[in-house]
Amino acid sequence: MTATPKRAPWKGVFTAIVTPFTESGALDEPGLRTLIKRQLDAGIHGLVPCGTTGETPALTHDEWVKVIEIAVELADGKAWVIAGTGTNNTEASASRTAKAKELGADGGLVITPYYNKPTADGLLRHFGHVAEVNPGFPMMVYNVPGRTALNLSPNAYERLLEIQEIAALKEASGNLTQVWEATHRFGHLTPILSGEDGINLPIWEVGGHGAVSVLSNVVPDLVVEQFNAHEKGDHSRAFELHQRFAALSRSLFIETSPSPAKYVLSRLGLPSGPVRMPLAPLTNPTHVEIVENDLRKLGLL
């Protein structure tokens, strides 16, 4: 390493922003601007463009660049921009992270390599190389075993903290005991953020520092209010909001994300458009009815 960066103070609600498309399937740049401005108006703390929720695997390189450019332009220092840069190819991850840095992002969201299933030694080599190519540029490690078939254990994360560029952990294992262990052991070193909207509040209660949220695509103001209430010690309000949108948090994953989120945004009259293949739109009548009922209960329809 040629630099020893300060670890980023990333805390709060970071929206894993969807990538809207036109009905013909093209990138909807005006729609993306509308969605981001809505997030900023709601007081969101950060944006995560080009994550899984943003359908990164289906974006062209030029589209990936454009989405990050728009996010950086509009955030303009009002919110952090953590761009999705990780792949299961180490050199590609390093290159994408370098490009995100060049585009002005505040950091890169780097997923643990999927399908490859590296050991702890392999993870150290992978993240270490990305950091070596991008000295001083902070990374948020993304643990999501449901998509990668690999769980980043607290012991493995401890080894990654040898890398100064590791600045935060997005924890989407769904294992509250594991999250508690991470916050207990490492929360004073790097922020630990929830990657599971349904347990955002429990994660904050055991020491978590925020969330990378799909739910905040839909109700950014309420998710920000919930986090702020928790931070102020207003646990009754935080719990009230948790109960209020717990059902929608579940139904946003009733099928592969972001299909339900895009359906919901379209019902709210917001830009979304279709999902790209290999995903499919939310059309199952039973699932649609569940989502519609959850939206009505929230007073959104």
Image (cartoon, grey):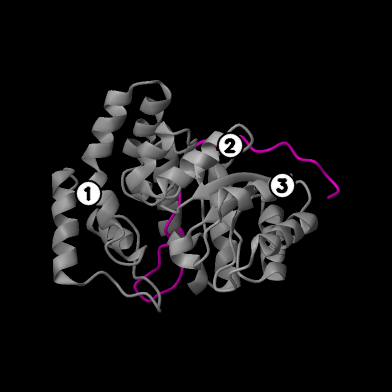
Q: Residues within 10 Å of mark 2 (few under 14, many from 20)?
A: few
Q: Earlier in the sequence, mark 3 or mark 2?
A: 3
Which residue type carries mark 2?
Answer: Arg
Asked if the stretch drawn in magenta spans residue 4, the answer is: yes
Q: Residues within 10 Å of mark 1 (few under 14, many from 20)?
A: some
Q: Mark yes or no: residue 28 visible.
A: no
Magenta residue span: 1-30
Marks 3 and 1 sit apart, C-alpha to C-alpha, by 36 Å
SS at badge 3: loop
SS at badge 2: helix
Q: What residue did someone put label 1 on?
A: 247
Q: What residue did someone put label 3 on?
A: 165
Marks 3 and 2 sit apart, C-alpha to C-alpha, by 18 Å
Q: Are marks 3 and 1 in contact (CB under 8 Å)?
A: no
Q: Residues within 10 Å of mark 3 (few under 14, many from 20)?
A: many
Q: Earlier in the sequence, mark 1 or mark 2?
A: 2
Q: What residue did someone put label 2 on?
A: 185
Residue in front for this viewpoint, 22 or 115: 115
Q: Are marks 3 and 2 in contact (CB under 8 Å)?
A: no
Q: Quadrant of residue 98?
A: bottom right
Q: Quadrant of residue 89?
A: bottom right
Which residue type carries mark 1?
Answer: Ala
- Relative placement, left or right, of 262 versus 11 is left
Residue 264 is situated, as x and y percent measured from the top left of the image, at 26, 57
**Residue depicted at 61% across the width and 34% down the height:** 9
**Residue depicted at 24% across the width and 50% down the height:** 248
Residue in front for this viewpoint, 291 or 160: 160
